[in-house]
Structure formats: structure tokens, C-alpha cells
């Protein structure tokens, strides 16, 4: 490639031009092929969860099961919140409603499904987390304005949620 400029003619080597173009293109392609995706698998939170005064909840990687007669399983995924927290996002609006001396699961009357934030307790305060590996519990909203913390429990505690006795 030949350029003339002022008093002197100079030549820009073609391999240099091609190299300068190939470097950012190669870096971009490499980033696309090798960069880990941010997609989270619902299986990352699979397990049995229990809370005081509420039926157990089991997540199997595809659906949420509730230890309450007549309550059908619901699909779920993840949702990232505005401030970076991560939540379980049920595909149907589910809340806990006060019932007798505890709570029971019910379909929410609101248009959008409430999210179930992944949380941990730090110095007595409930803090939302950004990764499933950092969570200690799932916060489930209740109709009375509270959030019940469902902590991991042995699978046997969720036998009723999974239809096993």
C-alpha cells in the first residue's frame, strides 16, 4: 500500500495493515467462543427447602413442588434484579398466605409473579446474593407483607412435596 504525503513517499506494509485489522477481530471472536455464558441453570438451586410454619418446597431443576395437597408443581427459572440480586422466578404467581397457625401456598392475585430472592444472613441482616453458590435460603413473600426464609433441608423433609409418603 503506497501513500504519498508531502515531500516523501512511504509504503505501509500490507502484512502490518492486515495484522492490525486481524488483532481486534480475533480477540472479539475468541471472546465470543471462550467467554463463559451468564446463563444459570435452574438445577443450581435444586433441593429441599423448609421454613417454620409453612409446607416444604422442593425444586427439582425444572419445577417447584409444594408439600401441600392439591397444589400443582410450577416451572421456574432465574431473574436478575435491578441491584444485582438473583431470584427464583416461578412461572406462576405464588405467595404464602396466613392460614391457621402458619402459612399455606396460594396463587397470587397480582398480575406479575412475585420473585423469590436468594439470600443469606450476614450479621443478623438478610442480604440478597448474586450467585446460587452464595445463598443460604430462598425468601418467599407472604400475603401479610413478611418474607419467610426457606433454608435447605434433607430430602426426606420434602417427601410430601414430591408426592412420596
Image (tube, helix red, strand yellow):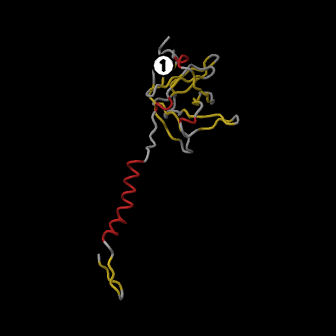
Corner quadrant of residue 52: top right
Q: What residue is rendered at 53% in x and 41% in y?
A: 81
Q: Quadrant of the N terminus?
A: bottom left
Q: Nearer the viewer, residue 27 or 55?
A: 27
In the picture as drawn, the residue positioned furthest to the top comes out as 165
What is the x, y in percent for residue 83?
A: 57, 45
Location of mark 1 (residue):
71
In the picture as drawn, the residue positioned furthest to the left comes out as 1
Q: Nearer the viewer, residue 37 or 148?
A: 37
In the displayed structure, 162 sits above or below 24; it is above
- Residue 147 located left or right of residue 19: right
Element type where label 1 sits in the image: loop
In the displayed structure, 101 sits above or below 59; it is above
Corner quadrant of residue 97: top right
In the picture as drawn, the residue positioned furthest to the right comes out as 123
Q: Nearer the viewer, residue 101 or 21?
A: 21
- Residue 15 located left or right of residue 133: left
Q: How many marks?
A: 1
In the picture as drawn, the residue positioned furthest to the bottom comes out as 7
What is the x, y in percent for residue 123?
A: 70, 36
What is the x, y in percent for residue 59?
A: 49, 25
Amino acid at each position: 500500500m503506497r501513500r504519498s504525503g508531502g515531500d516523501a513517499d512511504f509504503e505501509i506494509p500490507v502484512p502490518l495493515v492486515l495484522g492490525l485489522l486481524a488483532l481486534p477481530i480475533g480477540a472479539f471472536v475468541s471472546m465470543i467462543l471462550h467467554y463463559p455464558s451468564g446463563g444459570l441453570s435452574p438445577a443450581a438451586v435444586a433441593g429441599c427447602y423448609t421454613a417454620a410454619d409453612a409446607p416444604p418446597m422442593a425444586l427439582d431443576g425444572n419445577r417447584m413442588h409444594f408439600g401441600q395437597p392439591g397444589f400443582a408443581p410450577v416451572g421456574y427459572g432465574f431473574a436478575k434484579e435491578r441491584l444485582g440480586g438473583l431470584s427464583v422466578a416461578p412461572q406462576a404467581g405464588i405467595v404464602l398466605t396466613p392460614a391457621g397457625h402458619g402459612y399455606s401456598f396460594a396463587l397470587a392475585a397480582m398480575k406479575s409473579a412475585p420473585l423469590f430472592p436468594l439470600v443469606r444472613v450476614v450479621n443478623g441482616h438478610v442480604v440478597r446474593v448474586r450467585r446460587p453458590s452464595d445463598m443460604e435460603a430462598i425468601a418467599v413473600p407472604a400475603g401479610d407483607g413478611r418474607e419467610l426464609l426457606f433454608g435447605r433441608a434433607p430430602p426426606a423433609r420434602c417427601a410430601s412435596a414430591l408426592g412420596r409418603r
